[in-house]
């Protein structure tokens, strides 16, 4: 049993469980960051995508690899081909979009940290916040309602 690898084939409605887009649907990621999904395909041995997603990612013909496996060489070869087809304007748009995504991820990370912090507070600490007493008196619960 230990030698058997389970292969998970993701669809548009599948949710990624790990990585920078953890908890998001593949279809959503497909709209904003196709390169990340290409990276997942070539770097995650146990994950694959349906044929329609592979077509949208331009992974066809010689660029399709046998799963379960990883292949950096094919990934880099495909990226070189795809990037050489971009105009200067498209490269600039891609760079700007990546910066926006990075900023959004930072904001989401901060929100998750705040949420995790408030979840760790027990009943008595939450009461202290509500009654403005104790070490949490400077906190307000209103900032956690986003």
Image: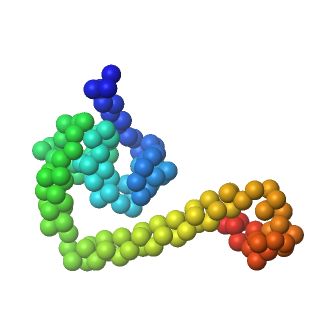
Front-most of residues 3 and 143: 3
Q: Is residue 87 shown above or below 121?
A: below
Number of numbered discs = 0
The image shows residue 64, relative to residue 74, as above or below, that is above
**Quadrant of the frame with the C terminus:** bottom right
Q: Which residue is pictured at 84% across the width and 73% down the height?
A: 132
In the rendered image, the residue lying farthest to the front is 135
Along the line of sight, which residue is nearer the eye, 129 or 66? 129
Q: Evaluate whether residue 71 shows in this view.
A: yes
* Rendering coords of residue 86 (x, y %): 20, 69
**Residue 114 location, x and y as percent?**
62, 66
Give the residue at x 42% y 49%. 18
Left/right placement of residue 135 relative to residue 118 reads: right
Q: Is residue 105 left or right of residue 114?
A: left
Residue 60 shows in this picture = no
Identified at 53% across, 65% down, the residue is: 108
Instruction: Determine whether 75 is above or below 52 in the image.
Output: below
Colour scheme: rainbow
Displayed quadrant of residue 95: bottom left
Which residue of the protein is positioned furthest toward the top in this rendering?
1
Location of residue 63 in the rendering, given as x and y in whole percent from the top left corner: 16, 47
Q: Position of residue 92 (x, y in %)?
A: 28, 77
Residue 60 sits in quarter:
top left
Q: Quadrant of the N terminus?
A: top left
Please report the residue visible at 84 percent of the width from the left and 63 percent of the height from the top.
127
């Amino acid at each position: 049993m230990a030698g058997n690898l389970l292969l998970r084939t993701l669809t548009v409605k599948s949710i990624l469980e790990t990585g920078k887009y953890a908890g998001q649907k593949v279809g959503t990621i497909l709209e904003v960051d196709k390169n990340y999904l290409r990276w997942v395909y070539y770097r995650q041995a146990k994950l694959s995508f349906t044929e329609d997603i592979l077509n949208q990612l331009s992974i066809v013909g010689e660029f399709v690899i046998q799963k379960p496996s990883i292949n950096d060489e094919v990934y880099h070869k495909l990226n070189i081909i795809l990037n050489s087809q971009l105009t200067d304007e498209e490269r600039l748009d891609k760079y700007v979009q990546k910066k926006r995504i990075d900023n959004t991820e930072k904001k989401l990370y901060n929100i998750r940290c705040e949420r995790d912090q408030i979840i760790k507070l027990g009943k008595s600490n939450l009461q202290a916040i509500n009654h403005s007493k104790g070490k949490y008196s400077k906190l307000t619960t209103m900032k956690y309602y986003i």
